[in-house]
Amino acid sequence: MKIIEIHAMRGPNYWSNFRKKLIVMKLDLEKLEELPTNKIPGFSERMEKLFPTMITHRCSKDYEGGFFERVKEGTWMAHVIEHIALEIQTLAGMECGFGRTRGTGVPGIYNVVFSYMEEKVGIYAAKASVKIAEALIADTPCDLMSDIKAMREIREQDRFGPTTGSIVDEAVARDIPFIRLNKQSLVQLGYGKNQVRFRASMTAGTSSIAVDLASNKEETKRMLKEAAIPVAEGVCIVYEEEVEEAIQRLGFPLVFKPLDSNHGNGASINVKTIEEAKLAFEHAKSFSRKIIVEKFISGADFRILVIDHRFIAAALREPAHIKGDGISTILQLIEQENLDPRRGYGHENVLTEISIDKETLACLAKHDYSLETVLNKGELCYVKGTANLSTGGTSTDVTDIIHPDNIIICERISRIIGLDICGIDIMAANLNDPLQLTGGVVLEVNAAPGFRMHLAPAQGLPRNVAAPVIDMLYPAGKSCRVPIIAVTGTNGKTTTTRLIAHIVKNNGYRVGFTTSDGIYVQNSMLTKGDTTGPVSAEFILKDPTVEFAVLETARGGILRSGLGFSICDVAVVTNVQEDHMGLQDINTLKEMAQVKGVVVKSVKRDGYAVLNADNPYCVELARGADCKIAYFGFEENNPVIREHCRKGGIAAIYENGYITIKKGDWKFRIEKVATIPLTFGGKLKFMIYNVLAATLASYVYGFKVEDIRMSLETFIPSATQTPGRMNIFTFKEYKVLIDFAHNADGFRGIKEFLSTVESPYKIGIITGTGDRRDEDIRDLGRISAEMFDHIIIRQDKFLRGRKAEDIVKLLEEGIHQSNPNQSYEYIPKEIEALRHALSIAKPGTFITALSDVIDNAIELVQSYLEKENNLQLK
């Protein structure tokens, strides 16, 4: 078997609009295409032995054990690999569950699709599942546990921590979108100007001064003491010589901790001897220049969580510990404790496995214990110095029993330090009684406190502490999104996108938009290139200045990664025509329509899908849509439009020379087509379609008719406004048209326009694209022979796996099929071909250069025009 390619879907996609996180592995079974599972001796038995838990896989049988039955009956290896990929993720603690395997149309080659929780784990699972299947086929050893261990390690490296993850999960539950901004915990909630960023439990609203104060334990203690908050008595020291002075002043037992560290790093508690004190000092010194020495207060260790200056939760924390049985060694007791199903690797379970490290040995040494010591029955032994859950500590929820006076103290502390989210560490006999009565003290105030102890305590009620964070970041009435209009289709996407963006901008919004020539915010191009995929969409949605997004959304990005957004307000499908057929396993127009339909399915329920009523594949998309529908078309009497409007629907039509909105039986004329510059006096039918689509999208979004009209009148086609879209340059003796048309439908639109052009001699410069089907390339030659007097073929780019001469031959075949006597020549280089066309132009000649990359052509023609103008001025 051979893996051809692996893609990770990260948004709504061709395979599922609801399951955004999918791995798509294109797999060549090679010789195994002829060997279903029932023809491989012993395969079924070996698989059941290796994966007994796969008994739960129902498959198409829809009952437990159904998949094993399929294997015995005989199924293809790609299907087996799908189930292995899901099962090994489950065994690694990431239950996914969704999978499907589909043929590509090429015998032996399949798309294996399955869900994932962490992308890198999903990719690992794809590769590992093939390796495991090969081992099962060959009856060779397979180290399944090493793969499971590797996936767990990858997960812990890549996934969000419990705090960040809980906030993201709460946001998703409230339909708030998020974007991960780095490989750690920096996350953006919301889009554009309505975004809010956070990192773990630090938010965009967290005061940097407050964080600095909380990080300085000495300064924190001083401010709290001055505010009559009970704190532990202590001193700050720098040099080892000061240790004895601190001991004399405070007396044993003591606590040593770094001045500006957190999470218990460098801390030593219950220090009782001068030797221990010196060791504790050196340990803390490795984390900070200044060391806090405090009187050790006996009692329980509590963490109070305050969010937005309101008490949210309280937990009792205990360091990792074991209880003796009079028989087992400490090492054996730790191993037994780690068998607790609640303990897991990293953050995968409620509790973390207890590791044995230097801290463990140091804790045991304080009691003259070692790992081989046998504890008395019932004897409690702490094996960590601090109560962090990440080192095996436990927590018990005590939120409901904290005394009101203690709540008031904690809420005061959050305001004194100035933290919007803070964790307050208190040492006290209990929290049921006021600290003044128990003698309890505040030990620390923590910026960016962890939530895990509250989200999943070992005992007590779990608390959704992420909810108040979202309440604070997005209070009632605050929007988390910006409006999104997404534009897809075969032809006309870029022009329609630009026109909609122009309308949006004229309505007072700061608009960000993506096109096949670049990313723009307002009038500024920020990135040049084909920017119609999910990365470009995220670029716009991450921009904090953007108030409205218009996103051209092409086929390629949808198939590679899915959409870069989850929901849009309006989706426009301009048309579905034959282009890019045979690429990425899309072989029919129906399949291509399904790709475009991903955008339609992303429209929110009260939003609109704007569809071309003259295109049957667009009309079919309405059947699967879960939103409102609006149609545009050339004829008012189109049966689809007529029936739609009869039911009270909205449509845009070309009626009596006008762009008209039809709502039920009512008509609202927007503008006369002849006065809309983009239509070139009404000569360009394909441009009229683009205007209809943009007008309707703007109208259903909610823009006023008069504002749309003004925008249509002021959108002037040019090399600047619409590069590569009907850019006409007028010279003294001839004219040059440069257009992006690169498929048969685009060529037909140019042919229709040229039929209106008065010219004695029409020259066409054409090219093909190597990854198109032979027939598609021949079509370009055929149509070219129907509209040009002389053709110049050029082919220096976009070979995409073919030789230039092969593409040229197909173009020539198409030309000869249409007109055996057609005049044409071959000049490989684009610039040389254009220069030659300009050199042979006669008075009245109309030169048309058609290409899917037009920048060089525009620059050359503009330079020639500038020279001519300069000569005329002289």
Image (cartoon, helix red, strand yellow):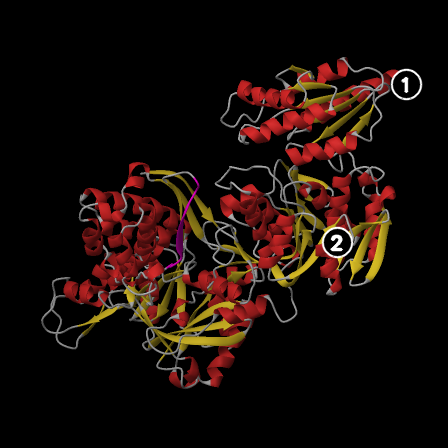
Please give the label number shown on residue 873. 1
**What is the crowding at mark 2: few (fewer than 14 residues within 10 Å), some, or many (at least 20)?**
many
Q: Quadrant of residue 603?
A: bottom right
Residues at marks 1 and 2, CA–CA distance in whole angstroms: 45 Å
Residue 633 appears in the picture as rendered: yes
Q: Position of residue 266 (x, y in %)?
A: 34, 58
**Residue reaching furthest to the left:** 327
Q: Nearer the viewer, residue 157 or 479?
A: 479
Q: SS class of the residue under badge 1?
A: helix
* Position of the N terminus by quadrant: top left
Q: Position of residue 256 (x, y in %)?
A: 34, 63
User: Mark 1 is on which residue type?
Assistant: Leu
Magenta stretch?
Answer: 96-105
Residue 665 vs residue 539: left or right? Answer: right
Identify the residue at horizontal 48%, vertical 66% (top origin). Answer: 220
Q: Is residue 299 above or below residue 571?
A: below
Q: SS class of the residue under badge 2?
A: helix
* Position of the C terminus by quadrant: top right
